[in-house]
DNA sequence: AAATAGCACTCTCGTTTCGGGAGTGCTAAC
DNA sequence: GTTAGCACTCCCGAAACGAGAGTGCTATTT
């Protein structure tokens, strides 16, 4: 497939670059003039004919300029994937913003979403890191009213969950505290699997709470529906979405979180931290994204806590800018998550 | 201002109703035919002329039908405000959904947003109830690593806040528990103001934590930036937003939460629970909403915890449906919040 | 043989032209 | 006060049109 001559390659890359900037079909004349090439428009036309033949380019109609096909974009992306660099200035600005924010997961997520969206002029998506092997750290049981009890469950990694329980009969704070104390010594540092395989406890209250804790652990997995997004109005700025129907179909994805989750899950399971993935035109699988591309990365600490983040834009998006940016932000977030986790691991 | 003859009134209301359905300027002929009135088109023309004179109607251009002005809509809304009823069937469906959901505030908010959006075909906005007089209930201090401490603050009303503190020097869990115990007896049931006016505590650690608690209380106020929205793609379905620039400006509001907050705050301070407010065309104050209307209601328990909810749609929205629906959902949520709070108040 | 200049051809797009149609306001009659 | 009749205005969509841009092919140059 990669039997392109050097000249065809140059031409293809230039044309796509130009199209990305102008959003207009690119003709031979325009190409020759803009990039003062040392061969004539006729030659360019011949080469473009060849590239069209090979499936990299397309003509919207006879006697219009050429437009890249999905295949063309793929070639373009694979060419630049490892070349593109984020300007140092931008790197500093972004890094600065992160280190100035309050050191809370939620802050980081919204910040990441906001930065990605504004810098890429696309829609950003960030999922909270999903703890892969949650470990128990601490529990508190606080009696509130009669049979109601507030349970606060703290995980290693700083994740905190609270829940209001209704017991079958009133229990004194005294007894609750003792249960909590026993569970805390018993469970400290254990994973779901370890807890699940414990023998039944003698005290029935202890056992009941233990079951609830397990349930809560299980919830963690499905809890990744916390998706932060930003910048969906950016999409409306793009000429390809000036007809509202197209735009609506695309934005709809961000309302029906399930499609989005599905997409993120499917595309990131086979990619590892640090590796980017670029979906072009929905890759035949997501009809709603036929006009779009997505740059997706996984971040976090493999085996411990990982999340996904990415940018959606028109297929015509500025990959040269988006790709390194997604990569950079993913790196930053990975570091932050890493710090949080290792801090927490020191404890005992 | 309300010197309309009975006939003018009928005509005005019919015309607006028709325009809301058809999105087309309405002419005298169409009106006469569709609603078999017992007077002629010429009469209608005369009356429409008068209504135009009075500022209720507008002609997009000579020899087009009439279109309601903002003033016209206002009249329309005030006429139907107390008449419109939500069909019982719909009431049951909605109520059913609420009672089937898990009894958590977050669930209710998202559910309310989702119902409002899908039923009204507009964009919905729901803010979490803002506790007006937060009362202290309980604190837990959990030592994690070295100088880091997890503070869990429980309010009456079930609101729970957690925060990781970094102390200046390591403190044993023993001492933390004692501090927590002292504070719990001292502060139980107190409001912000009461806590703020306490004399300085003798133990410096106790005092430090107290200060932090106060800070957290203050955060509650500004914490109403939890805004749930849904259905923003609905807006793109409307013909008046087929040009993406208009749509973009409108949807932008939902990204810049600050404008939205401002708007909700300003318009609801002077309205009381149960009362609806209808903003038409941005009321001159919100340029971005010139094409839109919003139906807003406050819900909750006055003096305790109140939130806001509403629907944004084109000025041409179906008020007859939206108004009673917003009112109904606000009522439901008020009841739910009320139940939660009174439960919690029984405690001591 | 590869590159280029020239040329005829095609197709889009913005503009202009033009009638049909809908709706109005006015006047005169009921 | 209401209505019928009528001349007038203005929008809108269709058709016509010309400019412009781009192409593919062929003959020519290097």
Image (cartoon, coloured by chain):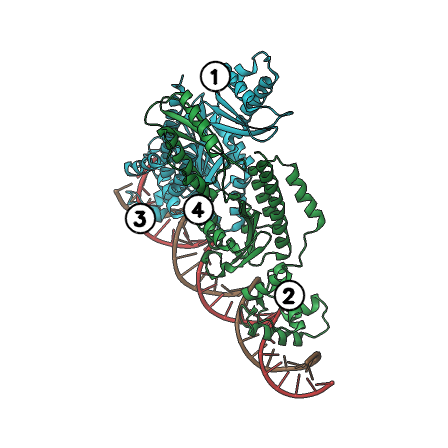
Chain colours: A cyan, B green, C red, D brown
User: What is the x, y in percent for residue B276?
Assistant: 58, 55
Q: Are marks 1 and 3 on the same chain?
A: yes
Does residue A215 appear to the left or right of B172 in the view shown?
right
Question: Could you say where residue A257 lies in the image, as x and y percent from the top left?
Answer: 54, 37
Judging from the image, what secondary structure is the residue with disc 1 in? loop
Measure the alpha-carbon separation of dots 2 and 3: 62 Å
Indicate the quadrant where residue D6 lies. bottom right
Chain ID of residue with mark 3: A
Q: Where residue A188 is drawn, which disc sits there?
A: 1
User: In the displayed structure, does residue B316 sit left or right of residue A236?
Assistant: right
Q: Which residue bears the numbered disc 4?
A: A234
Q: Is residue B242 visible?
A: no
The residue lying toward the viewer, choosing from C20 and B251, is B251
Q: CA distance from mark 2 to mark 1?
A: 69 Å
Q: Assess disc 3: are there few (<14), some (14-19) or many (≥20) residues with their C-alpha within 10 Å of its C-alpha.
A: few
Q: Going from the N terminus, do you reach mark 3 or mark 4 first?
A: 3
Residues at circles 1 and 3 in contact by the CB criterion of under 8 Å = no
Query: Of marks 1 and 3, which one's residue comes earlier in the chain?
Result: 3
- Is disc 1 on the same chain as disc 2? no
Viewer-nearest of discs 1 and 4: 1
| Inter-mark Cα distance, 1 to 4 | 47 Å
Looking at the picture, does residue B94 appear above or below residue A306?
below
Q: Which residue is mark 3?
A: A33
Q: Which SS class for mark 3? A: helix
Q: Secondary structure at mark 4?
A: helix
Disc 4 vs disc 2: which is toward the camera? 2
From this view, report whether residue B51 is shown above or below residue C27. Answer: above
Q: CA distance from mark 3 to mark 4?
A: 31 Å
How many numbered callouts? 4
């Amino acid at each position: 497939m990669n039997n392109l001559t050097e000249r065809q390659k140059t031409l293809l890359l230039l044309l796509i670059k130009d199209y990305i900037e102008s959003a207009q079909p690119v003709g031979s004349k325009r190409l020759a003039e803009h990039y003062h090439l040392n061969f004539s428009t006729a030659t360019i036309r011949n080469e473009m004919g060849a590239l069209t033949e090979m499936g990299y380019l397309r003509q919207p109609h006879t006697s219009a300029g050429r437009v890249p096909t999905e295949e063309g974009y793929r070639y373009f992306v694979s060419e630049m994937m490892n070349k593109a660099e984020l300007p140092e200035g931008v790197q500093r600005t972004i890094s600065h913003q992160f280190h100035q924010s309050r050191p809370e997961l939620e802050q980081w997520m919204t910040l990441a979403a906001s930065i990605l969206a504004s810098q890429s002029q696309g829609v950003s998506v960030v999922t909270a890191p999903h703890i892969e092997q949650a470990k128990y750290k601490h529990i508190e049981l606080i009696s509130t009213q009669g049979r109601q009890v507030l349970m606060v469950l703290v995980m290693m990694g700083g994740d905190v969950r609270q829940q209001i329980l209704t017991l079958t009969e009133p229990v004194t704070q005294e007894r609750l505290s003792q249960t909590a104390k026993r569970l805390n010594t018993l469970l400290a540092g254990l994973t779901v699997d370890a807890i699940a395989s414990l023998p039944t406890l003698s005290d029935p209250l202890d056992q009941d709470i233990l079951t609830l804790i397990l349930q809560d652990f299980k919830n963690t997995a499905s809890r990744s529906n916390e998706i932060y997004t930003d910048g969906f109005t950016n999409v409306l700025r793009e000429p390809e979405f000036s007809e509202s129907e197209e735009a609506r179909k695309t934005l709809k994805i961000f309302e029906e979180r399930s499609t989005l989750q599905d997409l993120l899950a499917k595309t990131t399971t086979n990619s590892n931290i640090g590796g980017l993935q670029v979906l072009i035109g929905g890759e035949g699988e997501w009809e709603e994204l036929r006009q779009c591309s997505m740059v997706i990365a996984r971040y976090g600490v493999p085996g411990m806590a990982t999340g996904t983040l990415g940018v959606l834009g028109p297929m015509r998006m500025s990959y040269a800018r988006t790709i390194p940016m997604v990569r950079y932000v993913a790196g930053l977030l990975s570091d932050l998550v890493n710090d949080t986790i290792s801090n927490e691991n020191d404890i005992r």
